[in-house]
Image (spheres, grey):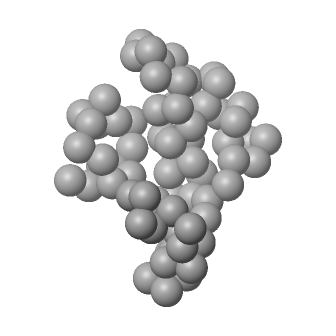
Amino acid sequence: MEPFVGRLAALLGEQGGSVAGFDPGVCIAAGMMAWTHHDPFEPLLAATAMHHNLPLVSADTVFDGIITRVW
């Protein structure tokens, strides 16, 4: 990633992407999830995908049954 770090924001725009931020509702939803795994970022990813009604692109099966996962 080192060659791209300085251009990540531009690349996101060039490729039609957008940023899904963590608003208080997403953070509260993530904090209320019964999460059995130890990665604190995973519930934030799941809650963000749920909030925006988007699938999550991940190879991690931990999201199965919680949100729509693509990969």
Give the percent coordinates (x, y) of residue 23: 75, 48
User: Is 57 on the left-hand or right-hand side of 29?
Assistant: left
Outermost residue on the front side: it is 3
Q: Residue at x 48, y 40 (%)?
A: 46
* Residue 15 appears in view: yes
**Residue 20 sits in quarter:** bottom right
What residue sits 65% from the left and 24% below the top?
31
Q: Quadrant of the N terminus?
A: bottom left
Residue 13 drawn above or below residue 65: below
Residue 43 percent across, percent down from the top left: 52, 31
- Residue at x 39% of width, y 44% of height: 67
**Between 17 and 68, which is closer to the camera in this rendering?**
17
Query: How many numbered marks are there?
Result: 0
Residue depicted at x 49% and y 86%: 14
Asked if residue 18 can be seen in this view, the reply is: no
Whether residue 16 is situated above or below residue 28 in the rendered picture:
below
